[in-house]
């Protein structure tokens, strides 16, 4: 579903949040529009335009196990 200015809407009519992949894909397609096949990078950008994602989500580190508290030696009186 699109609104009149070309933006994407969700089913309830609210604007859909755009992610980094959308903007990267848009920039690649703009580049392809302005530079013809004579450009030496055209084939590279054409291959990039076929990709679905461009950014890699950082892997979340696994939580470390908590260390056991060490007992302090008690002084005997």
Image (cartoon, rainbow, N blue to C red):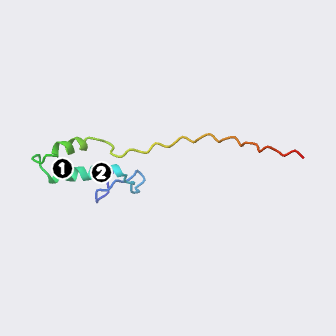
Q: Where does residue 72 sit, x and y in percent of width and height?
A: 77, 45
The kind of secondary structure element at disc 2 is helix
Q: Name the residue under label 1.
A: 32
Q: Residue 20: image x %, image y %?
A: 35, 52
The residue lying at 26 percent from left, 52 percent from top is 26
44 in relation to 33, above or below: above
Q: Name the residue under label 2.
A: 24
Badge 1 crowding class, 10 Å Cα cut-off, few under 14, some 14 to 19, many 20 or more, is some
- Residues marked 2 and 1 touching at CB (< 8 Å): no
Depth order, front residue of 52/44: 44
Q: In this view, does 16 lie above or below 66?
A: below
How far apart marks 2 and 1 lie (CA) works out to 13 Å
The residue sitting at 57% across, 42% down in the picture is: 63
Residue 61 is situated, as x and y percent measured from the top left of the image, at: 51, 42
* Mark positioned earlier in the residue sequence (2 or 1): 2
In the image, 32 versus 39, the foreground residue is 39
Mark identifier at residue 14: none
Location of residue 52 with respect to 34 vertically, above or below: above
Quadrant hosting residue 76? top right
Instruction: Name the residue at 25% across, 41% down.
Output: 50
Is 22 on the left or on the right of 47, as rendered?
A: right
Locate residue 35 relative to residue 70 in the image: left or right.
Answer: left
> Pointer 2: residues within 10 angstroms few (<14), some, or many (20+)?
some
Q: Is mark 1 on a helix, strand or loop?
A: helix
């Amino acid at each position: 579903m699109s609104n009149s200015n070309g933006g994407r809407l969700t089913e309830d009519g609210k604007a859909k949040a755009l992610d980094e992949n959308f903007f990267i894909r848009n920039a690649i397609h703009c580049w392809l529009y302005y530079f013809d096949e004579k450009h030496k990078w055209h084939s590279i950008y054409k291959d990039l335009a076929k990709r679905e994602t461009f950014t890699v989500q950082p892997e979340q580190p696994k939580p470390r196990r908590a260390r056991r508290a060490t007992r302090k030696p008690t002084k005997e009186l």
